[in-house]
Image (cartoon, rainbow, N blue to C red):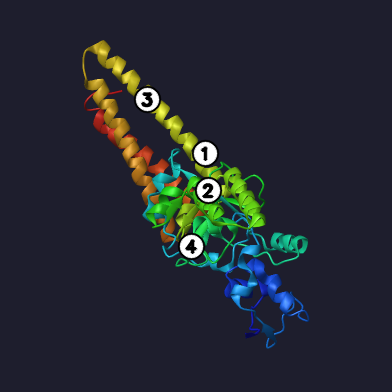
Amino acid sequence: MKHVVQPGDTLWRLAARYFGDPEKWRVIQQDNPTVAPRQLIIGDELVIRDAALASRGDTVVPAHTAPSSAAEQRPSLVPGRAFLFVLADEIDPLSRKLVRRVIVNPRVAERWAAQLGRPVPYVPHPESFGFAPTDMNSLVTPGRHAQGLKPSSFTSASDHLLGASRFSGSPFWIDVGKARAAGATIHETQEILGDLDKIIARTRNVDKVGRLNRVRQLVAADAEVLIRGPIPAAAVKGTSAMLLTRALQGAQIVGFVMTAVDIGTAANTSLRTSSVKPLAAEGIRQAGGWAAAWAGVKLGAAAGAAVGIETGPGAVVTGAVGGIAGGVAGYCGFDWVADFIYEN
């Protein structure tokens, strides 16, 4: 078939469109040897062979290394409203995070493209747009996605603390709980490996089996996890936001320790005076302070969102400020009430 070059066309995008795999751009180049791959001329006709003849299975690209396509930058189906996801979860040290490494700087993408000899798209502002799969309706299985087949309904990430170490790019942490709340599903490493095992069992070509086994090793080493469906911006944090979050988690732990010490001191006073009043009064102070702190976190996040600070480091800061203000106000207010029971 013929394709007339349109504004914005690249061999990479055309390969993704016609073959479902942007890595097949070389197939189009081979069929059009007189065309400069990086200087397509609008109005030129390109020969596009049948997708079946493009030998889709010949090229294996681990999905975790494949550069994201422009489709991954469509705004999430769930708008980035951080306050809808209860920002108090941001400082939960037990919340699970997955890490996805992507290129966000266009200059870095250009340098990689020069080294690799092919276009390398970059992914701008994941904290503002989140991540979206290339095709939510794709029937590509987890194992096929791991081979690099696209379009796909999955987004690759890693269960390692800082992401897969052999990959470059900026790390972004994805909150699993928030991704699930937005409708995404998580497909663990073992599920990917199991699907690859099924594909290997059906494959008779020795060379392809060897490549599949290599992909299997990479999936296991990277602790690759797939997320099916859009990932909202509210579930994504870059390095700055994560550093702030970790600092808040540290402050939160210190607060818990101080609360435990205060409760312990009040319990000893109750034992010494044979009265429950000291412990009851301290319980009121602490419960009021923490409840007001959580409410302050939510109000701070809502206030930030009202002025356009919905995601990223700004959302963490507004939530933290609200939490500190609410906690102080709550503790002082309930301290006044508790003093009527037992003055500290």
- Which residue bears the numbered disc 4? 153
Nearer the observer, disc 3 or disc 2? 2
Query: Which element is circle 4 on?
Result: loop
Residue 101's tag is none
Q: Is residue 42 or residue 198 the one in the foreground? A: 198
Q: Is residue 120 or residue 277 the one in the foreground? A: 120
Q: Of the residues under marks 4 and 2, which one precedes in the sequence?
A: 4
Looking at the rendered structure, the kind of residue marked 1 is Ala
- Which residue bears the numbered disc 2? 193
Q: Of the residues under marks 1 and 4, which one precedes in the sequence?
A: 4
Q: Of the residues under marks 3 and 2, which one precedes in the sequence?
A: 2
For residue 301, say whether it is visible: no
Q: Of the residues under marks 2 and 1, which one precedes in the sequence?
A: 2
- Which residue bears the numbered disc 1? 247
**Marks 2 and 1, how far apart at CA:** 36 Å
- In the picture, measured across the screen, residue 168 lies left or right of residue 88, that is right
